[in-house]
Amino acid sequence: MVDLKLFNASPVIDARSEEQPFEFFSNCPSLGQKRHSSHIPATDRVRKDSRYVKTFRDPRYSTLENEDLVEFKKIVGDTGVLTEAFELEAANTDWLKKYFGSSKVLLRPTSTQQVSEILKYCNARKLAVVPQGGNTGLVGGSVPVFDEVVLSLGAMNKIVLFDELNGILVCEAGCILENLDNYLLEKGYMMPLDFGAKGSCQIGGNISTNAGGVHLLRYGSLRANVLGLEIVLANGEVIDSLRTLRKDNTGYDLKQLFIGAEGTLGVVTKVSILTPPRLSSKNVAFLSCGSFVDCQKILKEAKSRLGEILSAFEFMDRHALDMVLKHSGKSRDPLPASKHTFYLLVETTGSFQNHDREKLDKFLEACMENGLVADGVVAQDNQQFTSFWHLREGVTEALSKEGAVYKYDLSIPVPHLYSVVEDLQKRLGDLAIVMGYGHLGDGNLHLNISTPQYDEKILALIEPFVYEWTASHEGSVSAEHGLGFMKADAIYYSKSPELVQWMAKFKQIFDSNGILNPYKVLPPSALKETSPSY
Amino acid sequence: MVDLKLFNASPVIDARSEEQPFEFFSNCPSLGQKRHSSHIPATDRVRKDSRYVKTFRDPRYSTLENEDLVEFKKIVGDTGVLTEAFELEAANTDWLKKYFGSSKVLLRPTSTQQVSEILKYCNARKLAVVPQGGNTGLVGGSVPVFDEVVLSLGAMNKIVLFDELNGILVCEAGCILENLDNYLLEKGYMMPLDFGAKGSCQIGGNISTNAGGVHLLRYGSLRANVLGLEIVLANGEVIDSLRTLRKDNTGYDLKQLFIGAEGTLGVVTKVSILTPPRLSSKNVAFLSCGSFVDCQKILKEAKSRLGEILSAFEFMDRHALDMVLKHSGKSRDPLPASKHTFYLLVETTGSFQNHDREKLDKFLEACMENGLVADGVVAQDNQQFTSFWHLREGVTEALSKEGAVYKYDLSIPVPHLYSVVEDLQKRLGDLAIVMGYGHLGDGNLHLNISTPQYDEKILALIEPFVYEWTASHEGSVSAEHGLGFMKADAIYYSKSPELVQWMAKFKQIFDSNGILNPYKVLPPSALKETSPSY
């Protein structure tokens, strides 16, 4: 039997969200989003991606004129057209403060009809457009690169309907993920996705990036749960595929193309999504172990012994934990007796607390008996539950406080998943702290490299090494963050030239003038091959 | 407390599969499939769809010549080219014996390269092609309409790899679903889909029809589980999207277009699929209740009390049960005390038998106390488990023994799901037995109308009434069977003309000569609008 005293939690408090700091950028203060009041320091502006160097404004696009503003005001009214510099600052800056656009106008439509009229107008005028949700992406996908019109979906935040028997939710694209989850709380359901940015990211952006998160292991990808979409194409055409049926095999499922297209094929305006019942029993264990091989064995043990109640299997290395402990003032190591190489967060979700706890105990017992787990704690109350999660989710914010950070979001077959971290540690030596954490149950590594300040020489040691390493191990250079602006050129590491050519064809078909979210997802060279006018 | 004596099972034996009889058609006897030896009776040939009347062979397609056979033999060898009438009979006939093609050749490639060469040749020659898996479809999607070349995938039945840590299976398209499930059994995993035809349907066909089945409620749709595909396009181009990663957000997910496209956009040759762990504990309860409103209440109760272990929630009405009891000789009513209007089959799957049984008992107790369940039994052993399932899955075969049957596979919002059965019962009166059964947990009704023989006048009373009824209740005219040949014209009841036009554009893009599975999925009128050459 496991000595349960081993699993009494030390208090761990006030760790913070990983994917998103508490203070973040948003242009939508009226929607419950927090606002970053400080001016972006000039020094931050050097934190640019090297892609900036080679990207030029495409001369096909028109430049905004006063007449355009007059037309926009006819569509969305005076209050829906924002042009002051302070109003645009947040929308022009990505969350990492790595990408800075210079858009001169932000539009806030309140209906699909308005989105349609805006796009029809911009398409005719050849004005480039960036659709923007919560602007919480990490690959520069939701900010203008140059002077694109920002099309904010934040004012389209109404719930359209909820089917309580089947758990089917229909809502507008600008609804904030956490608000939706809170709405479902009282109905006995929950959103099937969850991650650090939930307090500000919007469901339309989630779908446009096929967002993953900590519960994909249990509830599947967004593709698995999105039942319908309403989409506005670049020419203003509205595609109504907003079905509320769990099964519908009548023809090709075109809406799938827009899931994960990062706003480059169309703008998602409404969403129909299947939500799972919110089960009453939740547990989380925080474990340490000495090797990555043991981490994998524990994963296998969890899959077999926790079976249907396993809802998250996250991991972080000691470097990542140290980063949180250093920068999240009140956080404490829940396993202070000794330092270990790896830490795991194992969450269960079920409908019967006694059953879940018994399964969890047997799982932990097996792990201890097999010598897989060095030490561990199980959260005893909600506060500990939240604290453990904050240790895992606090890494990103902690890293941003440490200095410069080079972030990679990789899918790698689990047996090799940590080797890229070790190889980079050897490669960079004392130049940087290289760490790994992420969704081990999904084979998704967040590889982060921390240095005091940005340095092109260090970047040159990391890229294309990381991408080449990933490709040679049959991984993906973007597991869940998307390609955005940062990785458009890296697509060939994960997709064949033939597949990229097909993608470029689809871009051409849906957006022949290329006005939607330009410079993102596909490299310009691929688009040039498809479109003679490019 | 529930009196558990109520739940002792009466023996129910030897009921048979619903979606598929034990004797079925196949052209691949060497692959472990059973063979139907009898000649198709001439009288069966009148069981034709009324679409035959209005469909003419498209003169764009060439007619098979001897030179073509010579070329085919160069590609697949002599044994891969079947031209004898007896060899083609099964491939020319659909499972319902409703559709009869007149193909003169069946090709059995053994590699992707061969499929590519065949299609390249047929495309250049403008020979129409029907890709064929297990030929178990119910909408005439997998048989030739006229003299199309049959491209059988049955000889491509190799497993490529299995990742035991993550449960990721890569295999060729011709693998039979049940064989894959048996392969996974010893690895501790299972296929995420299951239905009556599993003994002969092939995974490529499953994916091409986005097959549903009894476990979709638990494991999600095929879209949720397919990680990668290899596809051959009409011109022979191979699209390699055969990834083995759970997460990969690098560009547009083009493979989704081929899932559920019924072989009209490309031929699936290899598959990468996520398989869930096979859990050790299974239970099934067979319940009766007096009203459809009570069925819904029991569904809600099951979702909340069985939560994570609920793996199927099926229903059938008394007419459907009677049909099985009449035609499956040894089957017996497990609840013989009195007749009820509705019967439910509730299955649980979990990792811990005691826990599952306790949850199931509490669920049943609540249903009894609330007066929702009239009577019920829980399977006490494997034989009873199988017998209960056979009662539900035996309906289709029983119906085929009764006489003519008009079959509809509808998605309807659950509260209205049974009303269409009642409305049709009123409409047809003594002319037919109208019954409903299916996947209640997914809102999927199998509406079946049984008559002694086929009668165009009865069909005229059913169609378009059923389709109009479904459309007016925001349902889908095909939940899981697809459109095939039978329902191509019915697509507009579930999809807008604009969406159908987009589908036609995609057909034109991927298959500009229209050689792949013609006359299926999209109505010819839609294709004519897109393609001037049509």
Image (cartoon, coloured by chain):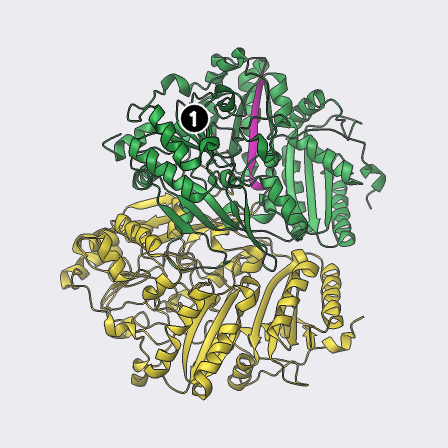
Chain colours: A green, B yellow
State whether the magenta stretch is mostly helix, strand or loop: strand
Say which residue appears at 50% left-offset and 65% top-offset. Answer: B412
Say which residue appears at 32% left-offset and 37% top-offset. Answer: A504
| Spot occupied by residue A236 in the image (x, y as percentages of width and height) | 35, 42
Q: Quadrant of the C terminus of chain B?
A: bottom left
Determine the image quadrant of residue A405: top right
Q: Quadrant of the N terminus of chain B?
A: bottom right
Q: Which residue is mark 1?
A: A105
| Spot occupied by residue B10 in the image (x, y as percentages of width and height) | 67, 81
Say which residue appears at 22% left-offset and 58% top-offset. Answer: B73
| Spot occupied by residue A372 in the image (x, y as percentages of width and height) | 71, 38
| Residue B261 shown left or right of residue A390 in the figure | left
Point out the stretch of residues depicted in magenta: A441-451
Determine the image quadrant of residue A104: top left
Q: Is residue A300 visible?
A: no
Chain letter behind tag 1: A
Determine the image quadrant of residue B402: bottom left
| Spot occupied by residue A209 in the image (x, y as percentages of width and height) | 48, 38
Question: For the residue carrying disc 1, how many other residues have a C-alpha within 10 Å: few (<14), some (14-19), or many (20+)?
Answer: many
Which residue is most to the top? A43
Figure disc tally: 1
Residue type at mark 1 is Val
Where B114 sits versus B525, above or below?
above
Q: Nearer the viewer, residue B219 or B463?
A: B463
**Secondary element at tag 1:** loop
| Residue B519 within the segment the image draws in magenta | no
Q: Is residue B387 visible?
A: yes
